Each structure stands twice: as structure tokens, then as C-alpha cells.
Amino acid sequence: MLPSRTNRGVVQDHKRLRAVDSGGNTSWIGSSSSSSSQSANAGFDSVATNGESEILSDGWKVHSEQILKVSELEADSKLGHEVSPSKTCTHEGFSRKCEDNGSPKVKKDAEIQLSPQQTMRMETNKAIAKAKRIQKICEEKVAESREKGIPYPKLEDLLVERTWLDALPGELQKPYMEKLSQFVTQEARGTIHIYPPPALVFNALNICPFDKVKVVIIGQDPYHGPGQAMGLCFSVPKGIKMPSSLVNIFKEIQQDVGYPLPTHGNLERWAIQGVLLLNTVLTVREHQANSHAKRGWEVFTDAVIRALSLKKSGIIFILWGNSAQEKIRIIDTNKHHILKAAHPSGLSAHRRFFQCRHFSQANKILERLGSMPIDWQI
């Protein structure tokens, strides 16, 4: 049901945007809220109105008296409509231009300021699409390597996020990384599975660019059960049973910020918002915890933490357990924020992890710094 109209302007329901010009004509952008099967490429439906404006479904209102300038609104059948980087939309003199791919482009000459929540959703969708592209690149590199009879690509080929390559110049070519790469390849030739899959070994870095990092959560080594590890500390793919540590993390979030317990343990949405979910060791043998410790991974992940500490400021480091808290020695505590608690494992969570309130504390710090808080709900 649309909200009542009070003046001429622009209205958005859950799945489409309606623009009303000064003559009272209304155009709808996107599919009808009553049918999710309609294509975004179907064009726009025009209807007559009495020239009144609408209050948007999320509670904000746009008047035609605002000085607005719009660029383009691209339709994407997977991600929904995305406003161009200027975050604008116009309502006067609609014209549609179809690109070669059939996606309609709307050009307008009035502008709508998106709410912070809408901006965050748009940026999240873009980040998800980018993460999928990067993972596909890594999977292709793995396939190419295996076609040559090599079970594991060189590690330097699996970190493809440019901002991290710039932040860690030459790190992947150092002798210790070459030795580590040879070790992991040799391990992969054996009969014991190595986790996570090669394409996800640098997942934490590939989907959380260096320039986007706002929060760092440090883990130990990957989960060593089948199908669990996905390159993000504490995270498991959808459909995989959540380990006790992750269950306790979600319980603390519920108590801290009031979010309901989720039905899955995939933390990718944290990562694409700027939460670096970094294990100190990035590979492991199946059913053998710490089996790849002290092989060189700690040197690399220390370099990651040092780069963040040196080249950025205002990062929130969330350190759970003694192992993570040892990293304080390489963090400039004058520039960054440290939140410490016990590890969320079943053995220690009831001692000093529950009621740590790290999730609300992190968001208060981000708001104080003028940054968008993290949406901890997945």
C-alpha cells in the first residue's frame, strides 16, 4: 500500500521508484511490487495522479522545491536498480535510452539525496558483485594451475585485490612467501585435504579492500572440518553447522545490539562493510588444528597488521583471546582503538567474552569518527 500523498514529488515503494512531474504525470521505475517476476528491462509504466508528492516507504520525503540534479539510473536484474555514483534521480522530462544490452537508462534533471541506509545498501550490492568477480578470477587461476598438473597455484597469484598489493609492495615475492607457497603446494599433493579451498585462501583481503578497512577481528587458523573454512575468521558458508565460537558471537550480538540469532554463519556481509576477518594462519590440514602454524603465515599476517597500523588511523582492532592480543605489540595504540576480551569458544566465553559489548562499542567509535557504523545483522 502506498503512503498518502501531500505534495508533488517522488515516491518509492519496496521495489520501484515513482517520479511525479509538475504536470501530475507519474512514471514508475522498476518492477511492480506485486510481481517479482517482472523484468527490470520492461520499461516504465505511466499513470495519472493529482500532482501530489509521496512520503517514501522508509519514512523520508522529497519535495519538488528541492534543488535536485540527476544522472543515471541503471537497471540490473540481479542487484536491482542502482543509482549512478552521484546518487541522484530526476523527475522532469523523463527520457529512456536503451543500451546495447537492453538495460534501460533514465536521464533526468532533478536530484534526490539518498538516505544513509539506501547508500549503504547500494554500496553493499556493489561490493557483493565485486567479491563474486574476484572469486571467479581466483577460481580460474586454480583451474589453470591444475590443468598444468600443479594442485595449488602460487600464493602470489591468489591475492588479486589491488589495494592490498599496493599496501604490501613486494611482500608476496619475499623468500619466506616463496618457501610458504612451495610448502602449501606440497601439502596439496598429499592425501589430506587442505582448507580453505585455494580460491578462498586470501578471501579476507580480496573482499575487504585495504582502503575500506574500519574494523579488524583477528582469529587463529581456519576451521579444519570439511566445508567449514571460507577464508574469513569465525565464518562458515551457509548450510554448514555453526561452530560454538560463532554461536557465542551471535549470542553476544543479540544481547549487545538486539539482533535476532541468524540462521547461518556466513560473515561476508561484515567483510564487505569494512570488517577484516583475519586469521593469523591462512591454511590448515583437515582435522589437524594448527598444522600449518609457524610455516610463514604469521609473518605475512603480521605484515598485514603492520601496514594497517602504519598507513591508516582510527581502525578498531577487536582482539579475542591471548593469541590475538599478542598482536598489540605491532599496533600503534596512539592511532588505533583496541577492544579486548576472552575468546568466544565454549571454554572461555562465559568467563570474559559475554557482555564485552564490542559490537556496540565499535559502532559508537565509528560514529564518533564520522564513519558509517557496521550493520552486524547478517
Image: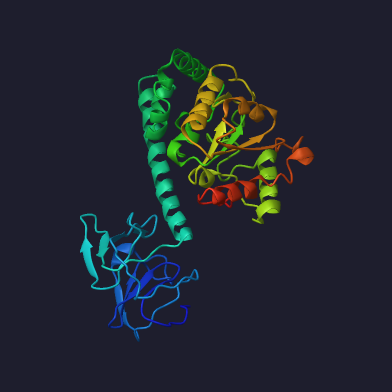
State the image quarter where residue 338 is shown. Answer: top right
Q: Residue placed farthest to the bottom in the image?
A: 50
Q: Position of residue 58 (x, y in %)?
A: 49, 68
Q: Position of residue 159 (x, y in %)?
A: 42, 29
Please indicate whether residue 225 sits to the left or right of residue 121 in the image. Answer: right
Q: Position of residue 115 (x, y in %)?
A: 45, 62
State the image quarter where residue 236 is shown. Answer: top right
Q: Residue placed farthest to the front in the image?
A: 334
Q: Nearer the viewer, residue 198 or 130?
A: 130
Q: Please report the residue visible at 43 percent of the width from the left and 82 percent of the height from the top.
A: 5
* In the rendered image, the vertical position of residue 163 relative to residue 154, given as above or below: below
* In the rendered image, the vertical position of residue 376 relative to residue 306, given as above or below: below
Examine the rendering and report whether any part of residue 211 can be seen. Answer: yes
Examine the rendering and report whether any part of residue 374 can be seen. Answer: no
Q: Nearer the viewer, residue 263 or 134?
A: 134
Q: Please report the residue visible at 49 percent of the width from the left and 40 percent of the height from the top.
A: 213
* In the rendered image, the vertical position of residue 39 relative to residue 243, given as above or below: below
Q: Please report the residue visible at 47 percent of the width from the left and 59 percent of the height from the top.
A: 116
* Number of numbered discs visible in the structure rendering: 0
* In the rendered image, the vertical position of residue 331 relative to residue 13, given as above or below: above
State the image quarter where residue 335 is shown. Answer: top right
Q: How is the image coloured?
A: rainbow
Please indicate whether residue 264 sits to the left or right of residue 251 in the image. Answer: left
Q: Position of residue 245 (x, y in %)?
A: 68, 39
